[in-house]
Image: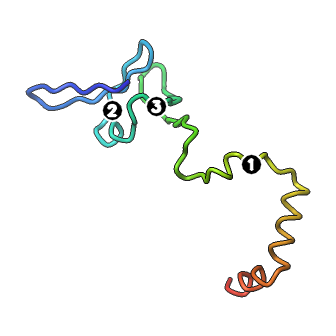
């Protein structure tokens, strides 16, 4: 959950997780999407956020087909790699390097 507090001396931004509340700078606050699931790694004594993982399934950087594809074993990856390098397109790509 995200929280903003305004006061005379400025605005404070917070990320709340269960019974903990972390004060963050505005750019970090704006990186969060309210209601989305996150895994937060923090230092327990200083209550400093060290890292955050966004746990959404609809990652805009992963193609939908790639998300549905089962993981490949080493043999399948090798077969795909040799197919793409043996065709005319593969040769042209290799020539551009």
Residue 90's x, y, as percent? Answer: 77, 79
Q: CA distance from mark 1 to mark 3?
A: 24 Å
Pair 2/1: label in front:
1
Closer mark to the observer between disc 1 and disc 3: 1
Q: Badge 3, how many Cα within 10 Å: few under 14, some, many 20+?
A: few
The kind of secondary structure element at disc 2 is: strand
Residue at numbered disc 1: 69
N-terminal label among 2 and 3: 2
Image location (x, y in percent) of residue 41: 52, 29
Mark 1 or mark 2, which is nearer the start of the sequence? 2
Pick the quarter of the image with the C terminus.
bottom right
- Gap between marks 2 and 3 measured at Cα: 17 Å
Q: Residue at x 78, y 46 (%)?
A: 70
Up the image or down, 92 lies above or below 17; here it is below
Residue 49 lies, in percent from the top left, at 44, 31
Could you tell me how far apart the alpha carbons at marks 2 and 1 are, in whole angstroms?
37 Å
Q: Which residue is mark 3?
A: 36
Q: Is residue 60 left or right of residue 21?
A: right
User: From the viewer's perspective, is residue 2 above or below residue 74?
Assistant: above
* Residue at the image position 16 percent from the left and 27 percent from the top: 6
The answer to whether residue 76 is left or right of residue 96 is: right
Q: Which residue is mark 2?
A: 24
Q: Residue furthest top?
A: 19
Q: Kindly indicate whether the residue at mark 3 contacts the one at mark 1 (C-beta within 8 angstroms).
A: no
Label 2 neighbour load within 10 Å: few <14, some 14-19, many 20+: some
Identify the disc placed on residue 23: none
Which residue is at a point 37% across and 20% down the rendered structure image?
A: 21
């Amino acid at each position: 959950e995200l929280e903003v507090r305004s006061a005379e001396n400025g605005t404070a931004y917070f990320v709340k997780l269960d019974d903990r509340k972390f004060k963050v700078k505005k750019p970090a606050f704006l990186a969060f999407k309210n209601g989305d699931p996150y895994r937060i790694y923090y230092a327990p004594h200083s209550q400093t956020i060290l890292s955050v993982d966004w746990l959404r399934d609809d990652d805009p950087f992963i193609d939908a087909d790639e998300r549905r594809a089962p993981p490949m074993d080493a043999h399948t990856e090798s077969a795909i790699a040799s197919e793409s390098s043996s065709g005319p397109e593969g040769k042209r790509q290799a020539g551009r390097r």
